[in-house]
Amino acid sequence: MRTGGAPSVWRSSEKSSRAFCPVCGSSLGAVDDAPVVALLTGAFDKPHLKELKPESHSYKGARPKWWHPEVEA
């Protein structure tokens, strides 16, 4: 399997684009015009690393009752 290289980008709205792997199609994150870059931690080889801990969460009101993003694992 090929790794590395530049991701493909698809313009998903007037203000944002989605980044994905051009080989397998896996989602990598979003690039907003603000500019804000949001990367999916699951796209990394070691998503559990402290340096990759999310700083914020979107749509917390719609989360499953069992999911508590503010609790340390």
Image (spheres, rainbow, N blue to C red):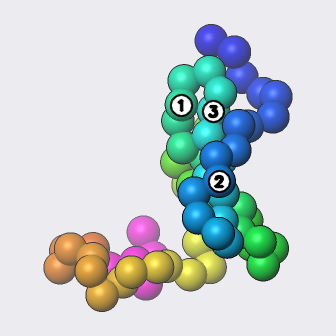
Q: Is residue 6 left or right of residue 45?
A: right
Residue pictured at 43% horizontal, 84% vertical: 70
Q: Is residue 4 left or right of residue 40?
A: right
The residue labelled by disc 3 is: 21
Res. 53 image quadrant: bottom right
State the SS at label 3. loop
Residue pictured at 57% horizontal, 57% vertical: 12
Observer-side mark, 3 or 2, equals: 2
Q: Is residue 38 magenta?
A: no
Instruction: Pick the residue in front: 35 or 11.
Output: 11
Residue furthest to the front: 14
The residue labelled by disc 2 is: 11
Percent position of residue 15, x then y = 67, 72
Question: Contact, CB < 8 Å: mark 3 with mark 1?
Answer: yes
Q: Is residue 12 above or below residue 44?
A: below
Question: Given the image, on which type of amino acid does mark 1 rest?
Answer: Gly
Observer-side mark, 2 or 1, equals: 2
Is residue 52 visible in the rendered image? The answer is: no
The residue labelled by disc 1 is: 25
Residue furthest to the top: 1
